Image (cartoon, rainbow, N blue to C red):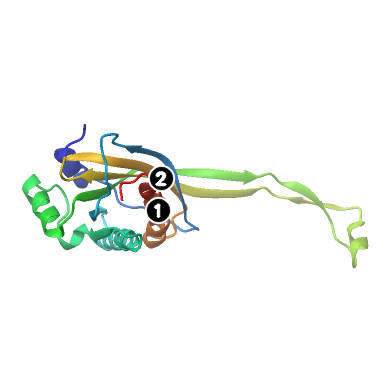
Amino acid sequence: MRSRSYFRNTIATLAALVVVFGCSTAAVKDTWKDPAHAGAFKQILVVGVSKSDSSRRVFEDGFSAALRASGTGASPSYAVLPETGQVSNERLDEAVKKAGADAVLVTRLLRVKKDVNVSPGYMAPGFYGRGYRGFYGGAYMAMPPDVNVYEIMTIELTLFNMKTDKPAWSGTSEVTEPGSVAKATEDLAKVMIAKMKADGVI
């Protein structure tokens, strides 16, 4: 079972959130809940580590706001844990206490992959003249294949129970074409918070 040291090391090694251009969508892939856990957490400290401090703040603010809107207390970790890199257990305990949190939500970027969707080309009739008669010109044009390259981020969220020093819930989500950290956060929060509510941890 993972411990507080795992949580501390995770904070130190999380990768940056990747920003690309496109229309973001998120979908839940897998979830796990500790069968021994019962009850919903009341106050969550949200941790999102990025090489960019502004990206971290956007993510933590967005996810915290979404949790509060769903009826669960939440606050961003940068307000009580502004430093980056590895932190001591004592510093972590201090931050959790200051936030009044009974749980900590940690994100981890598992992987980023490119996917390609190819729509085959086809032959289309040439157009000559007006109306439907214009298609009877006897000539055809070759329409090239449509190639769409997009990125998929797989993100893991782990909800740590600070009273037991163990994870109570975790889930993975795929975010396709995250147009920005703010948009990716909005889509991720929508699907993952709904799942956490369904699983009874918030």
**Residue 43 visible to the viewer:** yes
Residue 50 x, y percent position in the rendering: 27, 54
Amino acid residing under circle 1: Leu
Q: Is residue 82 visible?
A: no
Which structural element holds mark 2? strand
Q: In front: 55, or 95?
A: 95
Q: Position of residue 93 (x, y in %)?
A: 10, 50
Picture coordinates of residue 59, whole percent (x, y): 31, 59
The correct choice, above or below, for 60 with respect to 153 in the image is: below
**Residue located beneath label 1 in the image:** 188
- State the image coordinates of residue 98 (x, y, percent, origin top left): 11, 59
- For residue 173, the mark is 2
Asked if the residue under mark 2 is in contact with the one under mark 1, i.e. CB atoms within 8 Å, the reply is: yes
Residue at 26% in and 49% down: 105
Q: Quadrant of the N terminus?
A: top left
Q: Alpha-carbon neighbours of circle 1 within 10 Å: few (<14), some, or many (≥20)?
A: many
User: Where 141 sits versus 32, above or below?
Assistant: below
Rendered residue at 14%/53% (across/down)? 96
Numbered circle sitting on residue 202: none
Q: Is residue 109 left or right of residue 125?
A: left
**Most extreme residue toward the bottom, as rendered?**
130
Disc 2 crowd rating (10 Å Cα; few below 14, some 14-19, many 20+) is many
Look at label 2 and name its amino acid.
Answer: Ser
Horizontal arrangement in the rendering, residue 140 relative to residue 163 (left or right) = right
* Alpha-carbon span between mark 1 and mark 2: 7 Å
In this view, the residue in front, 5 or 163, is 163
